[in-house]
């Protein structure tokens, strides 16, 4: 495992909520191709840490790198960003004034300048809202940094499931998976309007691919079933299928075995192992079910009260006195 | 094939085979079936208007004129359906974009507006100045779309009630800006003398002949409807529905909620812009009082009553409500006076117009909250408890590790 590249590196991640330090200086890495678990008692900061990794909340300090790219950190020099927005417009106004002074354009100069400046300002503000990748890279050159948003993380190759299932309940299983494939599809607005052959072909291909993914997680033949009508265990599987549909490198599973019966849990463990062997996925697991954690993890990290208190193979962690203390408390004197 | 797939759709037992066949055909050739449907409707409406009892209410021409006005609301309802019904963004200020489309046309196609823009289409094109109507259908849509994005951008973080309040504010601001910018909008009086559309070979449309307006309207509605259906069935339409169901889950699946929502606002606004252009070209006058909150509210009621999320339903809903509200109720007085039914002939239906309208809204919400022609997914959301028991009774075979059954 030592020669494997780290696909995700979190350095000294801290997140404070007012006086509460939910995550405290946690260093955390995930080697490529590994199944890594994050455990800890309730309130240990697991979900907060998870949300930081996914770009849902910004860390108070620390940074997260994914696949060699800095994705998450405390926003830096965002005040300067407004300069980037107004700079083009100001430039246009200056040029316009200069042209007027020289009398090149005559009377129309003022009107043209005003229209161009307002147009540019609107354009840059829109860019700031939409934040395409090239715009973020441009900002980075000015030393301005904003954390990636959840959809940017998906684009980069991180997919997740939710602790409490969040399927699109009134859509069919296939539609759920197709939404997962959103980032994989290329159809533009014009394709949508004109229903181009390219877009229709893409829909057909995606539809078949969605069926394949459903088969992969063991949901063969229920594609047209509404998500909310599926049995609980199948809903969990469907959520994994939806996450897989985005073609991730790293899959984050938030308590995937919660509420499952022993048989379903067994199936789930087999599924997760197979995701690694068949798809070469890296998996991060948050889980309370110790059978799952100890059964499939390469490495286990234990959080307690926001701090990392132990890390190692399942065997090492199981015997660690601090872990036992965190879960069971100190022995009575 | 699982057992579940072969179960009949809820409520679709009788005539199921025929309906399924039609459904399959129409979904495979969606655009073609829309064209056929609209052509049928366009052909039947004038005939209906010419036969009793409808012919006794008013002349065929007056009916046709009313249908064209109803078409404006059908367009508005289709556009708002994209925003509210599909993407789930409650917009209470939709009339603002209607106003922007109408004023855009008024600037391009009236002596007053041209003077402000510094162009003179009347001088350039003479009697055929109404030619600008055709490109303005597209340009008006684009201008409205830009404002849709501008007004949508500040509301992106808002949801539900808060979004509704902010859009309500926008809906009020826009007409007031047009009202108070006297110098460039002529204030309360509005911009008059707007050119009627001109079609080479046909000449300028006229107030006495409703047919050119009617056919233009039908053609525009058809095109908008085709676009709506295509979009809703595309990758973008799916993303809208995902955002409506669960925004966080949508973002966690890679959907850029910001651009996707802005797109919904922009496309909804552009449809309203088209409606505004046609309305201005038909009334030949644009004034701020045409775009009050009543318009936003009426269109929203049409969308809800017609069946949120279902474009045909919304279109029919808008048409029926407009026609009842603005044509039928107004002529009921004459009708009952003429046939002399004791009590009914003494009732003043015009005075009761809004009472009847209100009663219809309340009754509808109590009896059929999903609308007249519901979208199947919306219906599931509203009647979850009715459908659920059947789901519990279904036992799916155990899933094996290999994933086969």
Image (cartoon, rainbow, N blue to C red):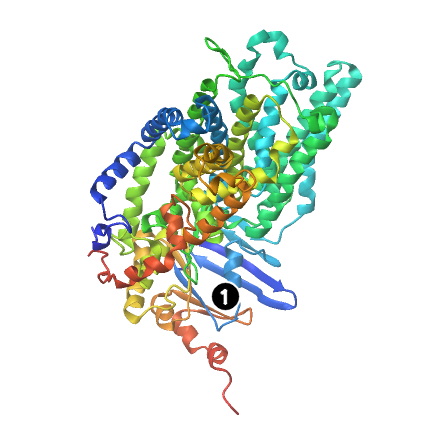
Q: Which residue is mark 1?
A: A46
Q: Is residue A276 visible?
A: no
Compare residues B77 and A271 and report the one nearer the observer.
B77
Q: Identify the residue shown where x is 42% and y is 25%.
A: B218
Q: Identify the residue shown where x is 61% and y is 67%.
A: A21
Q: Secondary structure at mark 1?
A: helix
User: Percent x, y for residue B317?
Assistant: 43, 39
Q: Is residue B320 visible?
A: yes
In the figure, is residue B118 to the left or right of A43?
right
Compare residues B267 and A134 and report the one nearer the observer.
B267
User: Percent x, y for residue A102?
Assistant: 78, 15
Q: Quadrant of the C terminus of chain B?
A: bottom left
Q: Identify the residue shown where x is 39% and y is 24%.
A: B50
Q: How many numbered marks have been drawn onto this rendered protein structure?
A: 1
Above or below, B85 relative to B333: below
Compare residues B191 and A5 and report the one nearer the observer.
B191
Compare residues B369 and A102 and report the one nearer the observer.
B369
Q: Could you classify mark 1 by the number of other residues whose Cα lies within 10 Å: few (under 14), some (14-19), or many (20 or more)?
A: many
User: Percent x, y for residue B58?
Assistant: 46, 26
Q: Identify the residue shown where x is 66% and y is 16%.
A: B114
Q: Where is residue A6, by image quadrant?
A: bottom left
Residue occupying the far bottom of the picture: A333
């Amino acid at each position: 495992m030592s020669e494997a590249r780290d696909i995700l590196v979190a350095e000294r991640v801290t997140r404070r909520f007012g006086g509460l330090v939910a995550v405290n200086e946690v260093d955390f890495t995930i080697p490529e191709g590994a199944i890594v678990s994050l455990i800890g008692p309730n309130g240990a900061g697991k979900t907060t840490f998870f949300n930081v990794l996914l770009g849902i909340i910004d860390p108070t300090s620390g940074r997260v790198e994914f696949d060699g790219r800095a994705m998450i950190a405390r926003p830096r020099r965002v005040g300067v960003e407004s300069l980037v927005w107004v700079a083009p417009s100001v430039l246009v106004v200056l040029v316009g004034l200069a042209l007027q002074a020289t009398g090149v354009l005559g009377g129309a100069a003022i009107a043209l300048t005003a229209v161009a400046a307002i147009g540019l300002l609107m354009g840059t503000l829109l860019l700031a809202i939409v934040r395409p990748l090239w715009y973020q890279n441009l900002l980075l050159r000015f030393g301005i940094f904003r954390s990636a948003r959840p959809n940017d993380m998906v684009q980069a190759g991180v997919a997740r499931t939710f602790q409490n299932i969040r399927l699109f309940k009134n859509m069919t299983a296939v539609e759920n998976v197709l939404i997962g494939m959103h980032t994989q599809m290329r159809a533009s607005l014009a394709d949508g309007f004109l229903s181009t052959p390219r877009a229709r072909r893409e829909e057909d291909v995606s539809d078949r691919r969605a069926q394949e993914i459903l088969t992969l997680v063991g949901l063969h033949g229920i594609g047209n079933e509404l998500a909310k009508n599926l049995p609980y265990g199948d809903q969990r599987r469907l959520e994994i299928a939806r996450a897989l549909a985005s073609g991730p490198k790293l899959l984050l599973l938030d308590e995937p075995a919660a509420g499952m019966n022993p048989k379903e849990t067994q199936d789930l463990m087999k599924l997760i192992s197979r995701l690694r062997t068949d798809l070469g996925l890296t998996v991060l697991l948050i889980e309370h079910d110790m059978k799952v954690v100890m059964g499939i993890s390469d490495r286990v990290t234990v959080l307690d009260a926001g701090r990392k208190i132990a890390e190692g193979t399942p065997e090492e962690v199981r015997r660690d006195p601090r872990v036992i203390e965190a879960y069971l408390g100190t022995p009575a004197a | 094939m699982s057992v579940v797939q072969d179960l009949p759709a809820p409520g679709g037992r009788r005539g199921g085979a025929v309906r399924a066949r039609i459904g399959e055909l129409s979904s495979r050739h969606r655009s073609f079936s829309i064209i056929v449907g609209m052509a049928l409707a366009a052909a039947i409406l004038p005939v209906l208007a010419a036969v009793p009892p409808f012919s006794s209410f008013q002349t065929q021409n007056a009916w046709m004129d009313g249908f064209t006005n109803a078409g404006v609301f059908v367009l508005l309802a289709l556009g708002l359906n994209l925003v509210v019904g599909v993407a789930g963004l409650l917009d209470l200020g939709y009339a603002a974009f209607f106003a922007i489309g109408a004023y855009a046309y008024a600037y391009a196609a009236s002596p007053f507006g041209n003077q402000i823009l510094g162009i003179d289409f009347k001088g350039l094109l003479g009697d055929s100045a109404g030619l600008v109507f055709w490109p303005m259908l597209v340009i008006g849509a684009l201008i409205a779309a830009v404002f849709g994005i501008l007004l949508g951008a500040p509301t992106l973080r808002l949801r539900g009630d808060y979004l509704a309040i902010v859009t309500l504010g926008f809906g009020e601001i826009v007409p007031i800006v047009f009202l108070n910018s006297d110098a460039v909008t002529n204030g309360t009086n509005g911009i008059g003398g707007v050119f009627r559309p001109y079609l080479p070979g046909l000449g300028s449309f006229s107030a006495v002949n409703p047919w050119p307006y009617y056919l233009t309207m039908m053609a525009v509605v058809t095109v908008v409807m085709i676009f709506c259906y295509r979009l809703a069935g595309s990758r973008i339409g799916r993303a809208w529905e995902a955002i409506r169901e669960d925004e966080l889950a949508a973002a966690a699946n890679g959907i850029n909620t910001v651009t996707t929502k802005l797109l919904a606002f922009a496309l909804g606004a552009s449809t309203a812009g088209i409606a505004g252009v046609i309305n201005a070209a038909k009334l030949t006058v644009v004034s701020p009082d045409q775009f009050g909150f009543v318009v936003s509210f009426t269109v929203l009621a049409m969308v809800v009553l017609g069946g949120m999320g279902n474009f045909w339903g919304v279109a029919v809903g808008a048409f029926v409500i407009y026609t009842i509200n603005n044509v039928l109720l107004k002529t009921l007085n004459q009708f009952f006076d003429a046939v002399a039914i004791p009590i009914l002939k003494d009732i003043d239906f015009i005075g009761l117009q809004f009472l009847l309208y209100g009663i219809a809204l309340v009754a509808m919400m109590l009896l059929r909250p999903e609308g007249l022609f519901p979208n199947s997914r919306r219906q599931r959301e509203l009647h979850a408890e009715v459908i659920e028991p059947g789901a519990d009774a279904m036992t799916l075979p155990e899933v094996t590790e290999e994933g086969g059954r």
